[in-house]
Amino acid sequence: MTPEQIKQAIEEQIGADKVRLDGEALEVYGRDWTKIHAPRPRAIAFPRSTEDVQALVKFARENQIALVPSGGRTGLSAGAVAANDELVIVMDYMNKVVDFNAVDRSVTVQAGMITEQLQQFAEEQELYYPVDFASAGSSQIGGNISTNAGGIKVIKYGMTRDWVLGLKVVTGEGEVLELNKGLIKNNTGYDLRHLFIGAEGTLGIITEATIKLTRPPRDLTVMVLGTPSMQDVMQVLKAFQAEVDLTAFEFFSENALEKVTRHHQLQRPFDSSTDYYALLEFEAENEAVMDTAMQVFEKCMEEGWVEDGAISQSEAQAQSLWSLREFISETISHETPYKNDLSVVISRVPEFLKEVDDFVQETYPDFEVVWFGHIGDGNLHLNILKPADMDKDAFFDKCHHVSDKVFAITQQYGGSVSAEHGVGMVKKDFLHFTRSQQELAYMKAIKQVFDPDNIMNPGKVLDLK
């Protein structure tokens, strides 16, 4: 079918003004934050309800048109890129609160709700949605669930998966499923809800989600500590976790700090510089907690694990210190980074990071490497920056070969090639470094059950052929 025929057929089913074919729409809604694959969608559809989504899926199945679900388009693995003449399903207009229950401390929202809007809604109810990351102002709940997003609070609150009480989904067959229905306990066989969490739209499209909320944190305090080595960062983590209930524990390198402070004209946390920095956050509900935290800090100084540090004295200062970590991705985006999102068990982080860093530096000395990540849960972000005089395509091609070796190292450590960014098209060829052939076979079988015609985000995560 031509784009014009698709537009006419869809609007006859779900109403006028819900499909766009113009160049601007195709460019904007056909991509995500990755720069490797050029967008080439056939048409863009804007449903307003689960019924609209169901009609779109049935239409696509009948006419064998591939679909790409599109949320906030903040993904980093090309999971929402429409590069092969697909019909893009944009969830932007499905952004309403469907239901709220104060007793259950749960809220049901449409999948297109912005993460930050959900956080604000929870705050208005004197509650808290703890899944948080730099793209919260533009990412959508459906996309977060589809990639099982993590972020900066995982050490205390876990991943998105831990906050999803129920889902409404449209499968690749066009069937609507209501999964788990908000229950805390439901031990009645396979929990299909968890198949759709992290599936990146390859099994179906999430249209609504019931989300668990919790109490807000109290008196959050932030420390930034300068450490001589990654091994010292781990000692700091161990020391604080033994005494203080941390809500976050992040790290970043000196070159990451230098770039952020220069690009955003921010102050360094202290005058001295170290190879690595740890950012930790905790609830200082009373003087006893603060006294304990300071005692641990002093011990870390005495042991030589920390050379200098800064602690927030107000909410504004806490946010200022957080900016040093949260602004890294946006800062280095101007230098065309090739991103890797890796994880290993926490205890093996220092040796793993050193082995990967040594390989990249020795093999490609003209590539600058920027490290940061969620060290409290073993998640490292390896960013290789494009040299100014290198062609983008040549750079990405070279980095693709870098990844092959980096992922082989990751496999040796029993780690994951994608800790929280998903697989999409960027990591698809490397999935075997984390998943066994038996696992991949079962995953393909599951895909075929929910999407027998392979129209749901084909070419992402798995290739069925």
Image (cartoon, helix red, strand yellow):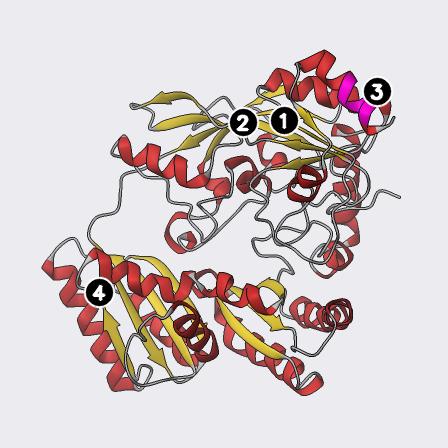
**Is any atom of residue 175 visible in this view?**
no
Start-end of magenta stretch:
4-8
Identify residue type, mark 1. Answer: Phe
> Label 1 belongs to which residue?
46
- Helix, strand or loop at disc 4? loop
Of 56 and 161, nearer the camera is 56
Badge 1: residue crowd in 10 Å (few <14, some 14–19, many ≥20): many
Foreground: disc 3 or disc 1: 1
State the CA–CA distance, disc 3 to disc 1. Answer: 19 Å
State the CA–CA distance, disc 4 to disc 1. Answer: 44 Å
Q: How many marks?
A: 4
Identify residue type, mark 3. Answer: Glu
Which circle's residue, 4 or 1, is located before the other in the chain?
A: 1
User: Which mark is drawn over residue 312?
Assistant: 4
Foreground: disc 2 or disc 4: 2
Residues at discs 2 and 3 in contact (Cβ within 8 Å): no
Identify residue type, mark 2. Answer: Tyr
**Is any atom of residue 319 visible in this view?**
yes
Above or below — where is 255 with respect to 203? below
Displayed quadrant of residue 415: bottom right
- Give residue 57's position: percent from left, percent from top: 73, 23
Which circle's residue, 2 or 3, is located before the other in the chain?
A: 3
Badge 3: residue crowd in 10 Å (few <14, some 14–19, many ≥20): few
> Label 2 belongs to which residue?
93
Foreground: disc 2 or disc 3: 2
